Image (cartoon, rainbow, N blue to C red):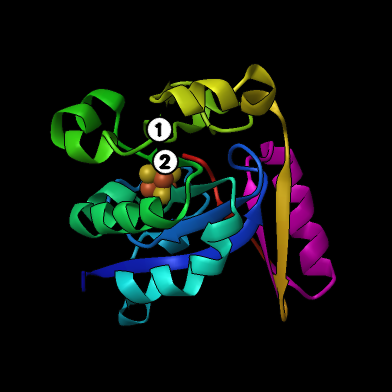
Amino acid sequence: MNKKICLNRCHFPVTSLGYGNRVGIWLQGCSIKCDGCIVPETWDIEPKHVVSVEALLAAIKPWLQCADGVTISGGEPFEQPAPLMSLIEGVRSVCPGDLLVYSGFTWSQLRRRFGPIIANIDVLVAGPYIARLRTEGCLFGSSNQEIRILSPLAERRYTAEVLWARSVNVAIDGTSVRLAGVLPGKALVTIQQTLRTAGFTGSLTHDPL
Ligand code: SF4
């Protein structure tokens, strides 16, 4: 395996995007460009985003060994299908937990085009973000998006409590603050204004589509 993948960032433990303590992997690159997307910084690919899948897996291996699962988001993960598959296979070889993947493609598009990848996923959150359908559910950003529970492990884990729990993770790096989780629009604006007043650059680095 020596595939290259475009990566935005990784974090651990992420507790706001699925069951338990998770490795969060945000891939870089999205051509869907939903109106109202609040992570437009994940759209464009630059050389700095390119890493080898092997190096990424080696870097997160200690996390994978103790995580309850892995969440892959973006950007649009399925716009890198071959590296995504390699990443998933590598994750699966180390982490026995569940794998949750976000996509801006619809469930029917994904099923038609990416069946072999989907066969390796436990939970899929599918569909573009539509701002006028914005919701405040835990795992998705707008009500058109579908959560597909695809394995017995996910059926056991993804109870209503997990699906609807509202949680956010905050990572501070220098003067950059990154949030992971789904926030109501007003809360995001309040947080951004507060951070700006305090001299921070604040952005929501993940909206679960
Ligand atoms: S919400 Fe997701 S699919 Fe839509 S433009 Fe943003 S990153 Fe792309």
Q: Quadrant of residue 51?
A: bottom left
Dot 1, crowdedness within 10 Å: few (<14), some or many (≥20)? Answer: many
Q: Position of residue 109 (x, y in %)?
A: 21, 29
Q: State left or right for residue 99 relative to residue 156.
A: left
Write the start and end of the magenta stretch as one range: 176-201
The residue closer to the viewer here, 21 or 92, is 92
Q: At x 65% / y 48%, what residue is drawn?
A: 21
Q: Which residue is mark 1?
A: 124
Q: Is residue 202 above or below residue 140?
A: below
Q: Is mark 1 within 8 Å of ligand 1?
A: no
The residue closer to the viewer here, 81 or 192, is 81
Circle 1: element type: strand
Q: Position of residue 85 (x, y in %)?
A: 25, 52
Q: Is residue 30 visible?
A: no
Q: At x 58% / y 38%, what residue is drawn?
A: 18
Q: Earlier in the sequence, mark 2 or mark 1?
A: 2
Q: Which residue is mark 2?
A: 102
Q: Quadrant of residue 3?
A: bottom left
Q: Is residue 117 visible?
A: yes
Q: At x 49% / y 67%, what residue is drawn?
A: 61
Badge 1 amino acid:
Leu
Which quarter shows the N terminus? bottom left
Q: Position of residue 17 (x, y in %)?
A: 59, 42
For the residues labelled 2 and 1, the Cα–Cα distance comes to 6 Å
Q: State left or right for residue 69 relative to residue 7.
A: right
Circle 2: element type: strand
Q: Is mark 2 within 8 Å of ligand 1?
A: yes
The question of residue 177 being in magenta is answered with yes
Whether pointer 2 and pointer 1 mark residues with C-beta atoms closer than 8 Å, the reply is yes
